[in-house]
Image (cartoon, helix red, strand yellow):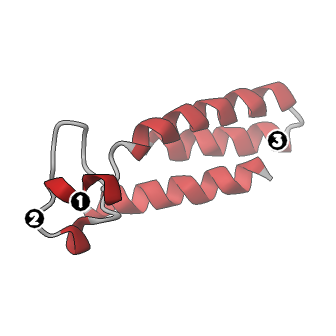
Amino acid sequence: LYLEGVAAAAAIAAERGDAGGRRRCLAACARGLRFADGLVYQDRDRALLPNPAFALGGVRSSLVRSEVRIDFVQHALSALLSITEASR
């Protein structure tokens, strides 16, 4: 959720011609994506999952929780799309 806001800030900075602000926001997005990568069930997690085909691509609610919620998946995808757009 926070990544969506930071990506929006990067886009606003770009629209205003604030290259430094855009660069800082995109750097924050990169750090946030590295963190979020640990929340996404991937092939590396296959041995821990009772049904990997069902869980892969799901986004956990935190580093210590295992449940996947569709709204977290949606926010992660939205953030990725917003960051991609702000990076152009």
Residue 50 sits in quarter: bottom left
- Label 1, secondary structure: give it: helix
Select label 3 or label 1 by which is in front: 1
In this orientation, does residue 68 appear?
A: no
Front residue of 54/88: it is 54
Near mark 3 (Cα within 10 A), the count class, few <14, some 14-19 or many ≥20, is: some
Whether residue 29 sits left or right of residue 15 in the image: it is left
Q: Distance between the residues labelled 1 and 2?
A: 8 Å
Where residue 13 sits: x, y (%)? 78, 36
In space, the residues marked 3 and 1 are separated at their CA atoms by: 40 Å
Q: Residue at x 53, y 47 (%)?
A: 4
Residue receiving disc 1: 46
Residue 14's tag is 3
Residue 18 position, x and y percent, is 85, 31
Check disc 2 and report its element: helix, strand or loop: loop
Q: What residue type is labelled 2?
A: Pro
Residue at horizontal 64%, vertical 50%? 83
Residue 34 circle label: none
* Rendered residue at 22%/73% (across/down): 54
**Amino acid at dot 1:** Arg
Q: How many residues crowd mark 2 within 10 Å: few (<14), some (14–19), many (20+)? A: few
State which tag comes first along the sequence, 2 or 3: 3
x, y (%) of residue 82? 62, 55
Corner quadrant of residue 84: bottom right
> Residue under circle 2?
50
